[in-house]
Image (cartoon, helix red, strand yellow):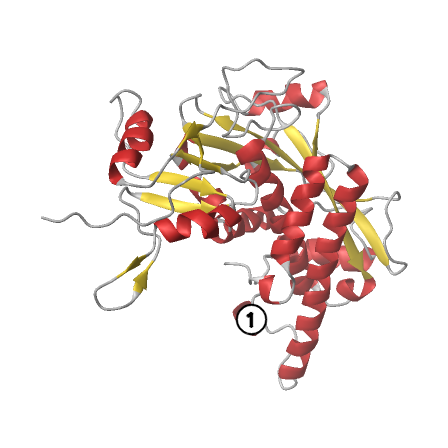
Amino acid sequence: MAMENLDNNVDMQNIREQVDEAMKGKDEKAISEALARMAEGIQQNILKEAKQETRSMLNLEMNDRNVLNKRGSNTLTTEERKYYDKVIEKRGFTDLDVTLPKTVFDRVFEDLEQNHPLLSEITFQNTTAVTEWIIRTTDCEAAWWGKLTDSIKKELSHGFGKVKTDMYKLSAFMPVSKAMLDLGPEWLDKYVRTVLSESIAIALEGAIVAGTGKDQPIGVIKDLKGAVVEGVYPDKKASVLTDLTPETLGKNIMAPLTKGGKRAVPSVLILVNPVDYWEKIFAATTFLTQQGTYVFGVMPIPAKIVQSIAVPKGKLIAGMGKDYFMGVGSGQKIEYSDEYKFLEDERTYLAKQYATGEPKDNESFLVFDITNLNTEAPKAKSK
């Protein structure tokens, strides 16, 4: 089931930008604070929503599964309900004799693919079911990248066969107030899934686009054949893209992606920064019809345009989404962190996500400089 869009309540775009900037700066304190602000905003929204639901359900039982399901909460499985009941009983995620069910992560990944265009386009693989057979890792979420221990790397490698599995961890913080614990299993599940989904999405998108390869996946803008300095891959040299005419796009994007005519390219994924989309791409792909109405997103090639704050300004990335593989595995525990406590009535929990990813080869994605892109929409040629 798709997760409710919280953008109407929290300025998620602004928060995503804050987290993205913090991650680029590699300041652990700034990252944890940005993620905590995001989780706190989500928590406050859910608490507010729960109060509204209580008022509107005076004549109904709060545990009416059908009503809750229609209003954005999941009907929990027996295993999920047992887990959240234990969390509420223990007043936190620690010292539990049960682990977070895999089905929770399955729903998180469904939400990721439905609510984040870039993640829905790439070869995005939930490998939780595989990793859980190999090791029982500590936690499960997203913040900054760091090395796994060699022993864990070795264990993970056994589970993925021929897939390159230099898995990296991505950690974050999830404050949980007493008020949230008091709402019940369905609301707690919604909070956990929403925080996991948002934080994972921000971090994975940044890694897919611009991951350096050092303790994190390799991004599509990186040159796999370039000189690697201390584990960091260099950026590809961007070719200048002058316009979005059929001739230019056919010659500079579609033809190269066929890899010398060795494969068909039925469609292409175009990634741009939001500011470039509205300043350049929007004007060049919007037309006034004879009926006096505008149509937008019109390209002379089969393409899907996706805006991503992870794309550097002035750049355009083109490729087929299936040419990027991202494997993601989640641990089964959420643990308490004594180091961070943001409010007196909250406990802050640490969760981690494990992921690996890279383009299939160096020619899978093309990078262009669109600084001086002609924004005028192509005119129809006279017969």
Residue at the image point whose x is 66% and y is 25% from the top: 215
- Side of 2 relative to 321 (left or right): right
Residue 173 x %, y %: 76, 46
Residue at the image point whose x is 56% and y is 45% from the top: 309
Work out whether residue 235 or residue 6 is closer to the camera in this orientation and state it.
235
Residue 163 x %, y %: 50, 22
Report the label total.
Answer: 1
Residue at the outermost bottom position: 59
Residue 192's quadrant in the figure? bottom right
Is residue 120 shown above or below 320? below
Work out whether residue 102 or residue 210 is closer to the camera in this orientation and state it.
210
Q: Residues within 10 Å of mark 1 (few under 14, many from 20)?
A: few
Work out whether residue 245 or residue 12 is closer to the camera in this orientation and state it.
245
Residue 202 x %, y %: 61, 45
Residue at the image point whose x is 65% and y is 28% from the top: 168
Residue at the outermost left position: 383
Residue 254 x %, y %: 30, 32
Work out whether residue 141 or residue 83 is closer to the camera in this orientation and state it.
141
For the residue labelled by badge 1, is the local secondary structure a helix, a strand or a loop?
loop
Residue 92 visible, this orientation: yes
Name the residue type under label 1: Arg
- Side of 315 relative to 61 (left or right): left
- Side of 6 relative to 45 (left or right): left
Is residue 34 shown above or below 154? below
Q: Which residue is mark 1?
A: 71
Is residue 304 shown above or below 162? below
Residue 141 visible, this orientation: no
